[in-house]
Each structure stands twice: as structure tokens, then as C-alpha cells.
Amino acid sequence: MDLLIRDTRVVDGSGGPSYRADVLIRDGRITAIRREGDPAPAAPGARVVDAAGLALAPGFIDMHAHSDLALLRDPGHEAKAAQGVTLEVLGQDGLSYAPVDDATLDGVRRAINGWNGGGPGDDSVDFDWRTVGEYLDRLDRGIAVNAAYLVPQGTVRMAVVGWDDRPATDDELTRMKRLVAEGLEQGAVGMSSGLTYTPGMYAPQAELTELCRVVASYGGYYCPHHRSYGAGALEAYEEMVRLSRDAGCALHLAHATMNFGVNKGRGGDLLALLDEALDQGADISLDTYPYTPGSTTLVATLPSWASEGGPDALLDRLRDDETAERIRHHLEVEGSDGCHGVPMEWETIEISGTADPALGGYVGKTIEQSAKERGEAPWVTARALMIADRLGSTILQHVGHEENVRTIMRHRVHTGGSDGILQGAKPHPRAYGTFPHYLGRYARELGVLSLEETVAHLTSRPAARLRLPDRGLVREGYRADLVLFDPETVAAGSTFEAPRTLPTGIPYVLIDGRFVIEDGARTDVLAGRSVRRTPRS
């Protein structure tokens, strides 16, 4: 049935002024837009939605999502659909589930159990794929929102080099380049790295540059979680800009923040670096989430040498008193590379989830708080938890700065990304609230961006980075991936105390012209599919 959205305020994604119009949708496309005063579009028999008081925007694009298994475990995916998200980019931070062989799949399932679940003993997902193409085919069986995929460089390195901290041999580099090329040929939109996560962080710049040359040859982009968001953050950003230039590859900086005390008030320094590169012709974009804490796994904060050899080797080192003391000294005194070169401050580390429900008493408390309750040093508590939970604990890391968040989100190449981890008893509220939080808190309440600017950051800008010719704008002929929201009431319901609360003020979300959210409730429609880059486009 045709759908006529009547008397809506069109915020079209371009960043230009909004306007009132009637919008007609047919066969999953926008077929007519009639502005106020124009004749109404002919739509005999169409279903009519009276959208007076509502704004119509392109569906939001989450440029940094960790829904790789969540979409398969729960295809309804209300956490994102209810926010107006119609497309997510998966395969982030260099670690995901394709391309793999059996050994690599076991390793990556254990390494990112805290992000996605799916660890040993979790049979909620049937891992019946091995290649990127097969994973995308699995998504095409039916999901709530569309999904694109980045080839994860750490997973590729795990498959070829293993967990060794050494440069790849020439033969190994050739094999890694082949795996990246195959992933891109099968539909991936680019490649990600997690350069504070093992084993991807073991790759030197020259190795990454060679892989990025492959990405560039397919018209993809490189999306690094770079080597530091703390001490040495600007140097880490500079490395990525230099690598991008040397490889001739487009660059998209993941969750581009400046964190920890050493970077308070330094958001402008990052933007000056990027502006210089942009003015010289670099192809750069970035994403951020509108919150100050970060979120990852507890084990990710440890020094990289402790993880060489894989999860079992790390657990053995944690169990050994002498080695564990070396880890503690590196973490608390020197500042480990896993903690961005900053000595650990245990009062900033809040446990957000445990793989073992029996350890749920740690959730919602900082390591320092739990240590005081136990009458022991924080490292003793953290070490015991990592061992007992077999490295599966997730954390909120309270190290961000609001002024940096606001400064960076104003930038000309900024886009939105939730970095939402959906696992854990008390996940970061960004997983359920990023996009309405931008609209309600930062546009309406604070005026950091206008409504029109905010929508552009969340729609057309990411669509341009993904090189999608028919998404990201409200235009005739474009796909009807759309969101209707109330600009006066839209808000994130999720909070740090109740992070799984759904947003308010978003009554309708459409994908392919079909309602996935209708009258504020999730429907049974699974209109989402994989969004694949055309080979060599």
C-alpha cells in the first residue's frame, strides 16, 4: 500500500532549512514531495499518516555499532530501531566474526565475549558462516535495521599471524591482503582496526599501510580505533592521518575523543590537526557518541605484552603471582598501552557487566568501591574478577570531558556513532540513547547544533562516507528509510541508572517504506538487509 505522510516538517538531511510538505512513499521509495502550497500528491487508496507536529528525517546511520551478534540473536533489535536507526556499521575496532576459520572463530569469540556475548558455552547464535559474504548472507535472512560491515584487521591478523607480537612476514602480509580483498569483494565497505586491542595492535604502521592500499583500491575506507585516546593521543591521530595519506585511503576516525586528565580542553587541538589535513585534500571523517564515559572490557586495559599468545596465555599470566605483579606495575605506575599510556585510576573503572551472572555483585560499582568492600587493594580485586569471569567483564571508563564532546561534535566532518555495547547487566546508555540524546539534549536543550545540522550529522554525512547514492536525504527517488519524531519531546530514555530504557518522541520508523516502529511500538517487520559495497566501486 502507498503511504502518504501529510503535513510534516521535513528535515531533509542536507543541513538546510526545514520545510512543511506532504511526502508520498511507494514500493520502498520516496516518489513525491509536495511543499506547503503545492498541489497534494495524487495518492488514491494510500494509507495516510497525519504528521502535524512531527519532523520527518532520513533514518539515522550508526557509524560505529557493536551489534554483530545482537542482530542475529534478536533480529527485532528494538534498542536501535526505537532510536530511529535504519543502518548500522558493524565489524568495528578490528575484531569481529568474519573472515574466520574454526580456530580464529574460537579465539575471537573469547576475545570479544564482553562486547557481544557469544563466548564459550553461549549457543544463542549458530555460527554457520566463515567468510564476510556468508556473514552478510546470514544478515539477509531478516533483521530489523540495515547493516554494513568492515573487515576487522585484528581478526585477519589472528587468522594469519596468530597472537604473536611481531611483524608479519612477506608471505603472511600477502595472505592478509588477500583476506582483506576477499572481504571487500564480498561487500564490506572498508576495514577497521583496534590498535589498543590485541592482536591487531601488534601490527606496525607499514603493515597497516599495505592493507589500507588494498582497501583504497576497492574504494573503501579505513576506520581505526587508534593507538591512544590518552597520553600521546595527538601523536596517535597524526599516525592515522599519515598512514591514510601514504596509502591513498579514505580515513574515518572511530569514536574520535580526547580523554583522561592529560587531554582536558584539548578537543580543539585535534580539530586543528584534522583541519590542516583536510585543507591539504585529505579525505577524513569521524564519529563520536554524546557522552563522556567510554566502555570496553576490563581486560582491554592491560598491557599488550600480557595478551601475547591469546586468552589462555593471559589467564595463565594473571594466575602467576610474579607475572601478575609485573602487569600491576605496568598498569598502575607506567601506564599501559591498553589504558592509553595513562596510569590506572581505579575510581574511574565501573563494572557494567559480567559474563558469569554469579559475579553480578560487582556490577554498578567501581573497582575501587569493590576493593574497599573486600578490604583489599584495587588490583587484587580486578585480578580476581578477570580470572573468575574468564576475561568477560565489561566496564564503563569515566575519563571523558564534556567540553571536548561538544567541541568535536561541531566539526565539519563529524558523524554520529553509538559505540553501543548491548551486553551486560548495566551497559552504557549510549547503546539505547545516542541518537535521541543528540536531538533532545544537544540540539533542543543546549543548542550546540541546530536541529537541521544535527540531522545532517546523523544522516547525509555518514551516507556520503559510505558512498550510498540513495540514502541519507529526503529526496524523490531515495529509499524510504525514514524516521518521524517530535522535535519538542524527543529524548533518550536511557540513563546510567536505567540504561535499557527506550527513547521518547519517536513514534514512527520506516525501512524500505515499511513500519518497524509504529505508534511508538516495535512491529514484527524485518525489512533490514546487508548494505554491500559494489566491488571496485
Image (tube, rainbow, N blue to C red):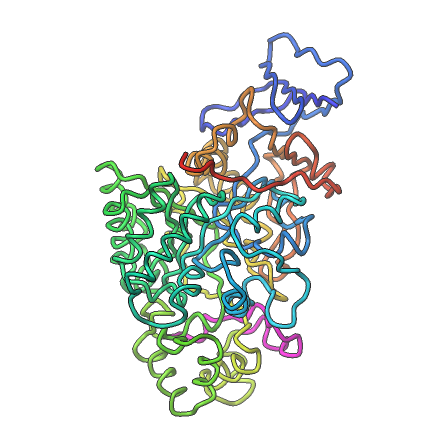
Q: Is 345 placed above or below 433 here?
A: below
**Residue 40 visible in image:** yes
Magenta region: 344-365
> In the image, is residue 361 part of the stretch drawn in magenta?
yes
Horizontally, residue 464 falls left or right of residue 499, namely left
> Residue visible at 53% across and 82% down?
387
Q: Position of residue 245 (x, y in %)?
A: 24, 45
Name of the residue lying farthest toward the right: 45
> Residue visible at 55% across and 57% down?
130
Instruction: Give whichever of 101, 267 is nearer the camera.
Output: 101
Horizontally, residue 237 falls left or right of residue 47, namely left
Q: Position of residue 13 (x, y in %)?
A: 49, 30
Instruction: Give whichever of 401, 434 is nearer the camera.
Output: 434
Name of the residue lying farthest toward the front: 171
Instruction: Using the rendered view, name the quadrant where residue 261 is placed.
Output: bottom left
Q: Position of residue 119 (x, y in %)?
A: 59, 69
Name of the residue lying farthest toward the bottom: 321
> Residue visible at 64% across and 7% down?
39
Instruction: Give whichever of 51, 136 is nearer the camera.
Output: 136
Instruction: Give whichever of 113, 364 is nearer the camera.
Output: 113
Instruction: Using the rendered view, name the quadrant where residue 488 is placed.
Output: top right
Q: How many marks?
A: 0
> In the image, is residue 514 part of the stretch drawn in magenta?
no
> Residue visible at 32% across and 74% down?
335
Task: Identify the image quadrant of the C terminus.
Answer: top left
**Residue 407 visible in image:** no
Q: Position of residue 485 (x, y in %)?
A: 62, 35
Task: Identify the image quadrant of the N terminus.
Answer: top right
